C-alpha cells in the first residue's frame, strides 16, 4: 500500500500536480475497490486522471497484450488521454487510434502491442474485426464521455466491440451530464455512482446578453471581441458554414483566429488547437465539437455567436469557462428582436465599447520535423533555441512534442529569422526542418 502511494506521488510530481481534488480522491478509491463505476463530474474537473491512476495500478508488466481499452467519442479526446498517459511516465506502452489518420500508421504502432489502447469506436471496431491483436486479456473497459458517444451514433460499433470482450472485470463510465442511460450491452451490473455534478450548482459563471441592431451579428461580434481585449476565448457556431462566414469577417478586421470543426482534416484540427493553446491565436471559432473533450486552457469567456439548440449544448459550451473555482463569462449574441430560448435564464445586459481594439498578435508557431520517435525531448528543443537560435527564456513559448514532430511558440517579430537560422540543423543526430506553421 505504501509503495503504491509513493508511485502515485511520483506520477503527480511528473505531472506537476501538488494535490488531487476531492472528486479525484473519491473516484480513485471507488474505482480501485469496485468492478463497475459511473463517474459524473463537470468538464475540466480532472476525470481523466481520476480513472488513469487506478487503471495503471491494475496493469501487469509481464503481460505483453492489450490489458485496458478506453473508448472515446472524439479524436481529440483520444490524443489528449494518450498524452496524459505518456506524461505519467508509468513505463506502460499506450497508443491512440482514430479516424482521420492513415490506417498504416496504426498498424505500425500496433505491431508493438500497447498495454493501454485508446480509440474512437469506429477505428477500434475496424481493428477488432481484422484481429490485429488478441482481445482475450483485456480486463478493464473505460467509456469516457460515454453519453457523447451515444449522441454521435456509435452504439452499433460499441455493441460490436463490447460483445468481443469476454473477460472484462472492471468497467468505468464517465460523463459531464446527468442524462446518462446505459444500454444493456455494456453489462454494467450494480454500478457505484460518484456524482459531483451537484457540486457545480454554485457556479461562478456570469451570463451576459449582447444585442445586435441587425440580424447579421458579425459587426457586433467584432465589437465584443475588441471590448474583451487580449483574452483567449471560443466563439461557438452551430454550422460549419457559419464558421467560414465568421472567419472571413474576422480576417477582414485583422483579428487573428483559428477554426475548429468536424469538417476539417485531422491535421488541421490539431494545428488549430496547438495555435490556440500556445497563444498564436487567441480566438477559436468552433462548433459544439469544442464544447468538451479538448485539452485547452482555462478560458475567461465564451461567446454563443449562434444560439445553442438545446439546454445540454448550452451547458457544455459554458463548461469551457468558469471551471472549478474560476470565474468566467458566457456572452449570448442575439438580434435585438430575437427571443432567447427558455433554458437561457438570468442574463445580464452587457454594455460594450465599440472603440476598443485587441492588441496585435505576439506569438507565432514554428514546426519542427522531429519528435519522440527520434528520441527528441522538450529539453533538447529548448537547448537548440537557446544555443543556436540565441534567444532568451522569455522568447521561448509553449513547446508541444508529438511522436514525429514538434511545435514551438516564439515571438512573431523573430519567427521568420529563427526558422531560417534553425532550418536544416541537427537535433539529436537528426537533420530537422524548421518552418513557420
Image (cartoon, rainbow, N blue to C red):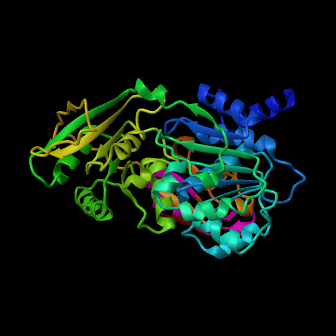
152 vs 283, nearest the viewer:
152
- Bounds of the magenta span? 407-431
Q: Residue at x 71, y 30 (%)?
A: 29
- Residue 422 included in the magenta stretch of the image: yes
Residue sitting farthest toward the right: 62
Q: Residue at x 63, y 31 (%)?
A: 24
Q: Residue at x 59, y 55 (%)?
A: 78
Q: Is residue 381 visible?
A: no
Q: Residue at x 60, y 74 (%)?
A: 102
Which quadrant holds the N terminus? top right
- Residue 430 included in the magenta stretch of the image: yes
Image quadrant assignment for residue 12 = top right
Image quadrant assignment for residue 301 = top left
* Image coordinates for residue 191, horizontal then vertical, percent: 65, 38
Q: Is residue 259 visible?
A: yes
* Image coordinates for residue 377, horizontal then vertical, percent: 70, 53
**Left or right: where does residue 292 sit relative to residue 349?**
right
369 vs 34, nearest the viewer:
34
Asked if 371 appears above or below 38 in the picture, the reply is: below
Amino acid at each position: 500500500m505504501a509503495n503504491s502511494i509513493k508511485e502515485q506521488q511520483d506520477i503527480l510530481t511528473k505531472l506537476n500536480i501538488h494535490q488531487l481534488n476531492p472528486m479525484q480522491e473519491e473516484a480513485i478509491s471507488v474505482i480501485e475497490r469496485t468492478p463497475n463505476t459511473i463517474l459524473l463530474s463537470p468538464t475540466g474537473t480532472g476525470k481523466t486522471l481520476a480513472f488513469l491512476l487506478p487503471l495503471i495500478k491494475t496493469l501487469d508488466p509481464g503481460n505483453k497484450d492489450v490489458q485496458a481499452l478506453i473508448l472515446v467519442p472524439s479524436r481529440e479526446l483520444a490524443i489528449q488521454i494518450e498524452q496524459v498517459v505518456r506524461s505519467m511516465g508509468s513505463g506502460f506502452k499506450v497508443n491512440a487510434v482514430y479516424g482521420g489518420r492513415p490506417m498504416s500508421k496504426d498498424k505500425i504502432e500496433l505491431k508493438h502491442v500497447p498495454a493501454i489502447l485508446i480509440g474512437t469506436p469506429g477505428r477500434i471496431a475496424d481493428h477488432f474485426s481484422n484481429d490485429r491483436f488478441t482481445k482475450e486479456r483485456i480486463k478493464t473497459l473505460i467509456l469516457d464521455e460515454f453519453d457523447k458517444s451515444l449522441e454521435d451514433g456509435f452504439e452499433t460499433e460499441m455493441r460490436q466491440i463490447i460483445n468481443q470482450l469476454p473477460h472484462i472485470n472492471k468497467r468505468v463510465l464517465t460523463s459531464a451530464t446527468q442524462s446518462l442511460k446505459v444500454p444493456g450491452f455494456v453489462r454494467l451490473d450494480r454500478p457505484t455512482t460518484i456524482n459531483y455534478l451537484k457540486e457545480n450548482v454554485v457556479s461562478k459563471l456570469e451570463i451576459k446578453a449582447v444585442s445586435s441592431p441587425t440580424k447579421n451579428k458579425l459587426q457586433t461580434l467584432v465589437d465584443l471581441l475588441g471590448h474583451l481585449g487580449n483574452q483567449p476565448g471560443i466563439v461557438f457556431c452551430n454550422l460549419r458554414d457559419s464558421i467560414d462566414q465568421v472567419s472571413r469577417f474576422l480576417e477582414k478586421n485583422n483579428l487573428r483566429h483559428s477554426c475548429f470543426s468536424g469538417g476539417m482534416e485531422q491535421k488541421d484540427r490539431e494545428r488549430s488547437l496547438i495555435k490556440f493553446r500556445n497563444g498564436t491565436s487567441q480566438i477559436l471559432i468552433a462548433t459544439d465539437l469544442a464544447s468538451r473533450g479538448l485539452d485547452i486552457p482555462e478560458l475567461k469567456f465564451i461567446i454563443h455567436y449562434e444560439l445553442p439548440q438545446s439546454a445540454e449544448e448550452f451547458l457544455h459550451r459554458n463548461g469551457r469557462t468558469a471551471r472549478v473555482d474560476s470565474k468566467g463569462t458566457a456572452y449570448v449574441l442575439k438580434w435585438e428582436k430575437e427571443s432567447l430560448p427558455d433554458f437561457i435564464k438570468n442574463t445580464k445586459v452587457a454594455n460594450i465599447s465599440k472603440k476598443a481594439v485587441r492588441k496585435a498578435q505576439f506569438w507565432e508557431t514554428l514546426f519542427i520535423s522531429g519528435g519522440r520517435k527520434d528520441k527528441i525531448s522538450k529539453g533538447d528543443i529548448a537547448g537548440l533555441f537557446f544555443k543556436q537560435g540565441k534567444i532568451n527564456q522569455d522568447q521561448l513559448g509553449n513547446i508541444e512534442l508529438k511522436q514525429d514532430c514538434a511545435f514551438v511558440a516564439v515571438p512573431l517579430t523573430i519567427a521568420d529569422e529563427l526558422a531560417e537560422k534553425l532550418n536544416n540543423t541537427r537535433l539529436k543526430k537528426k537533420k530537422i526542418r524548421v518552418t513557420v506553421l
